[in-house]
Every structure is written in structure tokens, then in C-alpha cells.
Image (cartoon, rainbow, N blue to C red):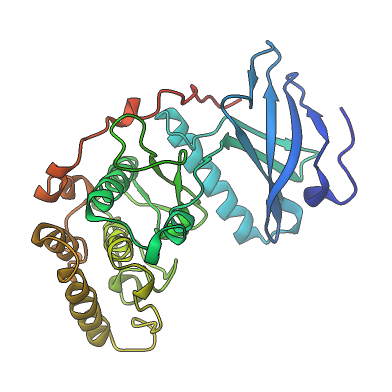
Amino acid sequence: MSKHPSNAVSGLSGWTFVDDAGTTITFKGRIGKGHYGAVYDVTYLTRENVFFGGDCPLVCKVQDLNRMSPEERMAVENETRVMRMLSERGHPLGLVYEGYYEGDLLFIITKKMTGGTLKEYLESRVRGRVSEECAVVIVRQILEELSILEELGICHRDIKPENIFLTHGGDFTDRVNPPRCVIGDFGLSAFCPRDARIRGAFGNDRYSAPEVFNSFYSVKCDVWSLGVVMARLLIGKTFDFATCYFVEKTLRDGLRYIKTRMQDRLEGVCSAEAVDCFTQLCTADYENRKYASEMLMHSWFRKCVSVDISTRDEKTMKLTVA
């Protein structure tokens, strides 16, 4: 086993790590860097000489736990637990490998989402928006993801385009091999059974549900956030996020902003079914807001071919925790 470079998480390119079980991880180029860690392209070779990282690219998130506060370490442990649960469901972002080096560096390997993020996808589109034909596919896919989280008792609390990843590039209206939206980045997530309530303001103010800032809330807060994502998909770059309407305004003004500005804009660019779907996603009273699994029954999605969760990507490897 080779000693990791002295500059720890930021200088692992070219380093090879072999754990006690004989698993070999080779770090390639660094593709991202955060305050306490970095993300690398890697290859992964098991003791039985089963190789991953060629046709099915992998990434490794490396985090320096020694530099974190107890609360931050707890958040990392929480995210890792969520990833373990997703791996048991065959989720594309489930764990391929989880391990420690010298007790301070945490390695988390997952399948690489080669299509980038939904935010990047939107930025590449003319006027930063998509057609309704495309939007209905994207929104349904995210609802299918949220329904899995609901079933597992997980509240994401930070649904936004930056945290939605695409399995590969391409056209969402492609009937043969369309990209698949996958929810990622569970650093702010919390365990919350379907009918339970939690509290604490987390996530992006622009996408957070109103109840997050005022009271207890449930997994339905993610449904509201998806409604705002839907508006962003259909309205595009001109979508007005200039005002933090739930923090700098009263709740009543914030709800009026949501219900008038976004809904009015949507009525000018898409069908009545789409507007109705948005209205239900962004129901102000979260007690009356539907769950993601219930929203999947909306008539708007009859335009969209359903993709079975368990077989959505024929190239998805069987994920196991080492």
C-alpha cells in the first residue's frame, strides 16, 4: 500500500490505494474540489480481478474527516447511510465502495453520471428552457426518484437543478435511450418516515417550501421544490429568482409571488394540464399537498412513457458495499 500524498485530498491523481481486502483503487484526474474534499475519476479492481471503471465510469469522493466539526462528520455519516440504502435498491448513485484510509480519509465510490447536472443541461439550451414534451419526462423521472425516497423515509431537503444528475447525454424525448434524471447530493437529507414531521431550515431559499421556514414539515417539502424546478424548466433564464421571497418578504407575500408570477408565466407557455400539475406540486398548505407517489397519477404524465425504476438503465452495474 502506498502512502497518500502529503497534500491529502487535493493531490491524489496518479495514486493507487490497496485496502486490507485486496481491493485496488487507482485515482485518475481530479474533477472537482470542495472545502473538505475532492472528487476523482477512478478505476476499481476487486481481489477477484473484477474490474470497474472502463465502460462503466466511476468517481470517488474523498473527504478529510479530521478537518470537520462533529456536526459535519455526522452529516457525512448520514449521507453515507442514505447511499447504502439506495445501493440496496440498485440505484445508480448507490455505493460501489466505502472505505477509510488511516482513519481520516473517507472514500466513497459511485457510478459516474456522465450527463452532468440538470442545471448544466438547462444552461446549454436556447433561452435556458425545454419544451413541454421534454419537461414532462424530466418531472416524471424526478417524481419517481422522490417516490423511492418517500418509501425509504428520506427527506432530501435540497432539490434543485444542481443536485439532479443525468445518467448520460442525449435527448429526453428519445424513445430508445433517453437520459435518466437521478437525485444526488444527500448532505442535507434527513430520515423522515412518510407521515412524520421534522423541522429546521435547510436547502436553497429559492426552491424551499414555505413551511420549512415557519414550522414542522414532511417529505412533501421535496414535492414543492420539484414544482419550482418544473417552472424553471418551462420558463427558462427569464425566471425571476431575484427576490428571496420567503426570507425577505412575509409568508403571505411569498405565496402570492409563487401563485401569481410563476403560474402566470406558465399559462403563457404550456398546456392547462402542465399548469395544473405545477399548482398541485406547489400547493401552499403542505397538509393538502400530495406525495410524490400520488403526483405520479396526474393526467399530465399520460403524455410520458413510464420507465420502470428497476430496469431504467441496462448498463447499471450491480452495486454492493465492500
Residue 21 location (% of width, % of height):
73, 19
Residue 186 located left or right of residue 69: left
Look at 20% across and 65% down and name the residue there.
286
All told, the count of numbered labels is 0
Residue found at the very far top of the displayed protein: 48
Residue 7 location (% of width, % of height):
87, 51
Residue 184 location (% of width, % of height):
47, 48
Residue found at the very far front of the displayed protein: 126
Q: Quadrant of residue 216?
A: bottom left
Q: Quadrant of residue 60?
A: top right
Residue 215 located left or right of residue 98: left
Q: Quadrant of the C terminus?
A: top right
| Foreground of the two, 47 or 40 | 40
| Foreground of the two, 73 or 239 | 239
Look at 31% across and 48% down and name the residue there.
138
Q: Quadrant of the N terminus?
A: top right
Is 43 drawn above or below residue 182 in the view shown?
Answer: above
Is 281 drawn above or below residue 176 in the view shown?
Answer: below
Residue 4 located left or right of residue 40: right
Look at 17% across and 50% down and name the residue there.
295
Residue 171 located left or right of residue 78: left
Look at 59% across and 50% down and name the residue there.
76
Q: Quadrant of residue 248?
A: bottom left
Residue 230 location (% of width, % of height):
28, 60
Is 114 drawn above or below residue 279 in the view shown?
Answer: above
